[in-house]
Image (spheres, rainbow, N blue to C red):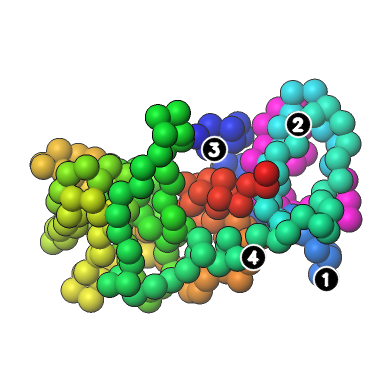
Amino acid sequence: MFSARFGIARGAALAAVAALVVPAGANAAIVVGSSGPSAATYPVGRKLDDSGVVTLRAGDTLTILDGRGTRVLKGGGTFAVSVSSTVPAKTSTFAVLTMQRAAKRVRTGAVRAGKDAAPPASPNLWFIDVEKSGKRCLVEGEPVRFWRLDTDRPATYAVAPAAGGTSVSLAFAKGAMVAPWDAASNPVADGANYAVTLDGKPVGTIEIALLPGQPADAEAMAATLIEQGCTAQLDLLATTLAQP
């Protein structure tokens, strides 16, 4: 799992995000994963001048993201932040990953892969994995959709405010990966925590962070997810945009 490679304390990184900026007008990459002796020098959230270099020590692993995707640098050594202009930008991949659509237009269906393949990941940054606890960033006013990996059987999850309140049912038909949330009757609230159960058994808890709008590009998106603490979505963004 991508998050397993992020060997740093997230709290310290979040406090440093606002201060670690690149001068106005400079192209920038952003650190989305950092571990090893230089993690304090290159914390998650630090922005790097596109024309600059990073110097890593033995045992360092640094994951940086820019408009051309995500790449992992391993030390020791000195590495250019930018990549060759012949590497195609990941603009279209980012657009598909962050596409907002009406819930009724979301296509569902099982995704099969070989026995040695990694489990399929969510195809959309805004889908909430119904069986993963944690904080989720959503764009205010947009449809809310829940996603599941196991599509072999129908399932109905119950999602209720952790502080108490009306439970909402999420019904997944057999073969369906996505179920819409009835936001008209039960609007999500910024900062709210929800408990998820299946057949009466706890599955996890989800905290909601509402964004006033969708960040325009991958770098801005990564910075926002880091600032809000939406680490599962940061992992998905980084893995989806990984360079070959």
Q: Amino acid at mark 4?
A: Thr
Q: Earlier in the sequence, mark 4 or mark 1?
A: 1
Which circle marks residue 2 in the picture?
Answer: 3
Q: Is residue 47 left or right of residue 95?
A: right
Q: Earlier in the sequence, mark 1 or mark 3?
A: 3
Q: Nearer the viewer, mark 1 or mark 3?
A: 3
Picture coordinates of residue 135 (x, y %)? 41, 51
> Can you tell which quarter of the image residue 43 is in?
top right
Q: Earlier in the sequence, mark 2 or mark 1?
A: 1
Residue depicted at x 57% and y 46%: 239
Task: Check disc 3 and report its element: helix, strand or loop.
Answer: helix
Q: Which residue is mark 4?
A: 91
Which circle marks residue 41 in the picture?
Answer: none
Q: Nearer the viewer, mark 3 or mark 4?
A: 4
Q: Which residue is mark 2?
A: 74
Please give the range of residues in magenta: 30-53
Q: Nearer the viewer, mark 2 or mark 4?
A: 4
Q: In the image, is residue 17 above or below residue 26?
A: above
Q: Amino acid at mark 1?
A: Gly
Picture coordinates of residue 167 (x, y %)? 14, 58
